[in-house]
Amino acid sequence: MTRTATLPILKYHNLVRDGLLAGLSKDEVLEGFRLFIKRLSKRYDICTVSEALNRCQNGDRRAIAISFDDGYQSYLKDIAPILVDMDAQASFYVCTGLSSDKQLMWNDQILVSCLHNKQLTPTLAKDFLSRYQIEFKQTSSHQPEFLKALERAIKYRPFKQRAGLIQSFQQQFGLSDDTRTLELRSAIELLNTDEIRALHQLGMEVGGHTVSHPILAQESAEDAHQQIISDQQRLAKILGRSPRSFAYPNGWHNRDFLDLHKGFVEEAGYEHAVSANYGISKLDGRDQFMLKRIELPTSISAFHLTKFYLKHWLS
Ligand SMILES: [Zn+2]
């Protein structure tokens, strides 16, 4: 019996920011990443999602994809040089509506207020959120747990409401621009259009991730459609070619996006899409618009790697 082809895609987020928040230095994070890529490339060819998909469909079990969500500058300055150096490639999913200078992702806007305002306690956050009928149960002010709890509380608000809420949060608690947080600040800045193009020119894949990162399932069909279609058009203009790959914001099927949105992605001209559903996709031709991924922590231990190898080789 022939084996169904499988496609392993690893999923990273902003590992420099997450490492700094966890108390690591940027050098430690990047050294760990370099080591991981080195180990991984002994067994695999590290590719973009589009290339790995093509190769895996043809039964190639040496291909593996790495993907990074949200277009952080750190991907161009810190991550891409390591990949190029190790002869590896990856896919990066960017939001074209957040690509003008000085824009931050919504969760990083919360982060800069928390860093600025040391008096911001769980009780104050609870009072603030109660004005929006949001319950907040976190009692520890220890970061990053406090920050994660704030993000969780706000994440699922419809996009416009969430943007308004964050704006008044920043007005009330301030914004950080002091030098202590400069390193973190530079880790959360997003790529502008020239930088997106530069990433593409380094041989990396740049894929769509909506205009402004709403949770699609929380939006009207019309708004979700516009978020996907006009992002694709903007990205095609920036890259000078149609992007092939798309990633759903937040990415859990039937929670963050629905079958309806898969149709919009296909209509936009994408060839496939990645989700945040955990696992390794079987390429049996059924669904290329909901590819699974394996999310990796900031620091990858030998244990994580072994667990992954087992999962892949047994799948
Ligand atoms: Zn994202």
Image (spheres, grey):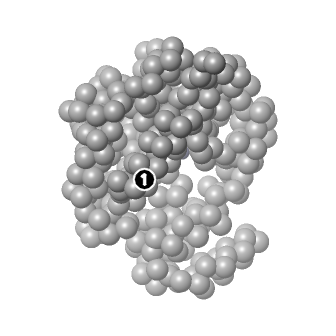
Q: Is residue 70 left or right of residue 164?
A: left
Q: Is residue 83 left or right of residue 189?
A: left
- The percent coordinates of residue 51 (x first, y second) are 44, 20
Q: Residue at x 24, y 58 (%)?
A: 28
Q: Residues within 10 Å of mark 1 (few under 14, many from 20)?
A: few
Q: Residue at x 74, y 25 (%)?
A: 263
- 56 vs 95, nearest the viewer: 56
Q: Residue at x 67, y 76 (%)?
A: 136
Q: Is residue 44 left or right of residue 140?
A: left
Q: Where on the image, by quarter, is ligand 1? A: top right
Where 150 sits versus 296, above or below? Answer: below
- The percent coordinates of residue 235 (x first, y second) are 50, 25
Residue indicated by mark 1: 304
Q: Residue at x 53, y 83 (%)?
A: 140
Where 161 sits versus 280, above or below? Answer: below
- The percent coordinates of residue 87 (x first, y second) are 25, 28
- The percent coordinates of residue 309 (x first, y second) are 44, 42
